[in-house]
Image (spheres, grey):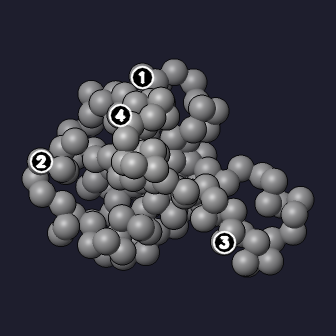
Amino acid sequence: MRILALDPGEKNIGVAISDPSGTIANPLTVVKHAARAIDAAVIAQLAHEHEAGLIVVGQPLGSDGEETPASRRSARLAEAIRSQTELPVLLWDESYSTQTARQAQAAMGARLKKRRGHLDALAATVILQGYLDEGGMETQSSEEREV
């Protein structure tokens, strides 16, 4: 089953997709933020087009696991997506995904000028690969899947 993952930001939403076996994450696209309902509809359409069976929304938690303004925005986006699709939508801790994506770009030898570009889709890939590496759906209880 393919899984779609999101790195929601204030201006852009990075989107990544897994391979059909749900093993490897790949960057897909960047959605320019418009309005929550519009963003949710675009994401639901992407999930449908790519035959995803699950949507994972990155949620940046504080250092002690507490909610932050950004994590509440992620939760509201997840709720808006649920109103647009029947697919399960879950929140996944995305703390430091952008930093990890930036480090990965540097390690791959990307020039500084290219590293300044949007890291959103790559950050979504980091979120999704983290989810997949943790065992994905196999490690989630039914309550957590619908969070």
Estimate the spatial distance between the alpha carbons at disc 2 and disc 4, rounded to whole Å: 15 Å
Q: Amino acid at mark 2?
A: Glu
Q: Position of residue 67 (x, y in %)?
A: 38, 37
Estimate the spatial distance between the alpha carbons at disc 3 and disc 2, rounded to whole Å: 33 Å
Residue placed at 87% from the left, 63% from the top? 112
Residue placed at 44% from the left, 68% from the top? 129
Estimate the spatial distance between the alpha carbons at disc 1 and disc 2, rounded to whole Å: 24 Å
Query: Is residue 50 rendered to the left or right of residue 32?
Result: left
Query: Is residue 22 rendered to the left or right of residue 25?
Result: left
Residue at which label 4 appears: 75
Residue at which label 3 appears: 104
- The image quadrant that residue 72 belongs to is top left
Disc number lying in front (4 or 1): 4
Q: Position of residue 93 (x, y in %)?
A: 39, 53
In the displayed structure, would residue 22 be above or below residue 40?
below
Q: Tell whether label 2 touches label 1 (CB within 8 Å).
A: no
* Nearest to N terminus: mark 1 or mark 2: 1
Estimate the spatial distance between the alpha carbons at disc 4 and disc 1, rounded to whole Å: 13 Å
| Quadrant where the N terminus is found in the figure | bottom left
Q: Nearer the viewer, residue 59 or 30?
A: 59
Numbered mark located on residue 37 in the image: 1
Q: Tell whether label 4 touches label 2 (CB within 8 Å).
A: no
Q: Amino acid at mark 3?
A: Ala
* Nearest to N terminus: mark 4 or mark 3: 4
Residue placed at 26% from the left, 55% from the top? 53
* Nearest to N terminus: mark 1 or mark 3: 1
- The image quadrant that residue 136 belongs to is bottom left
Query: Label 3 crowding class (10 Å Cα cut-off): few <14, some 14-19, many 20+?
Result: some
Residue at which label 2 appears: 143
* Nearest to N terminus: mark 2 or mark 4: 4
